[in-house]
Image (cartoon, grey):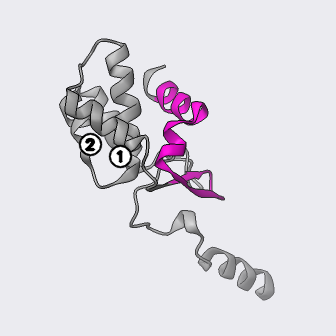
Amino acid sequence: MKKIYLILLLLVSIPTFSQQKSEKEILGYSCGYSGEPTSVIIKFGGLLYDKKYKSIKALLYSKIPVENFLAVVISKKLVDKKNITLTKSEMERIDELYKSAEKVPICGGCTYYKEIELKELLNSKKEVNGVTSYFFD
């Protein structure tokens, strides 16, 4: 019985990536053991709910790549829905982000973690559709 208890104690105390607090913002709709959305997903959900579209557009200029990604995808969707218009400088910024090699951390569940270049994410129909369906469907 002591052996089983020690093994369980060891397993519980071994840190895994999904349990550690990360200094990077991570893109994830169901991360960790709890399957919760990451803080950046919650942040953008709140901005959309409160219709703070100017704040979303401002995040095109964030230094955090995952915020750039979400700002681009959501802004473009808001343009399609005729909720916002983009200025020339915002459109130029979006063009810059489509060429960015900045890495965006992505998680899924408690075991999946990967870093993908922003340009690759923005050109991925799967990732873009994932964002739009999460926030707009």
Can residue 109 be seen? yes
| Whole-percent x, y for residue 39 in the image | 38, 50
**As drawn, is 134 to the left or to the right of 3?**
left
The number of callouts visible is 2
Whichever of labels 2 and 1 marks the residue nearer the N terminus, that label is 2
Q: Which residues are magenta?
A: 105-134
In front here: 133 or 5?
133
The structure residue drawn at horizontal position 74% and vertical position 82%, both measured from the top left corner, is 7
The structure residue drawn at horizontal position 55% and vertical position 32%, both measured from the top left corner, is 130
Q: Amino acid at mark 2?
A: Leu
Quadrant of image for the N terminus = bottom right
Can residue 52 be seen? no
Q: Quadrant of residue 49?
A: top left
Q: Which mark is residue 8?
A: none
Query: For the view shown, which residue lies furthest in the top direction?
Result: 82
| Mark 1 lies on residue | 67
**As drawn, is 65 to the left or to the right of 126?**
left
Q: Secondary structure at mark 1?
A: helix
Q: Secondary structure at mark 2?
A: helix
Vertical comparison of 111 with 49: above or below? below
Q: Amino acid at mark 1?
A: Glu
| Mark 2 lies on residue | 59
Please say whether residue 133 is one of the residues in the magenta stretch.
yes
Pointers 2 and 1 in contact (C-beta within 8 Å): yes
Count residues near mark 1 (Cα–Cα under 10 Å), then give few for <14, some for 14-19, many for 20+: many
Count residues near mark 2 (Cα–Cα under 10 Å), then give few for <14, some for 14-19, many for 20+: many
Vertical comparison of 124 with 129: above or below? below
| Whole-percent x, y for residue 94 in the image | 34, 36
In front here: 62 or 45?
62
Q: CA distance from mark 2 to mark 1?
A: 6 Å
**As drawn, is 69 to the left or to the right of 110?**
left
The structure residue drawn at horizontal position 20% and vertical position 36%, both measured from the top left corner, is 55
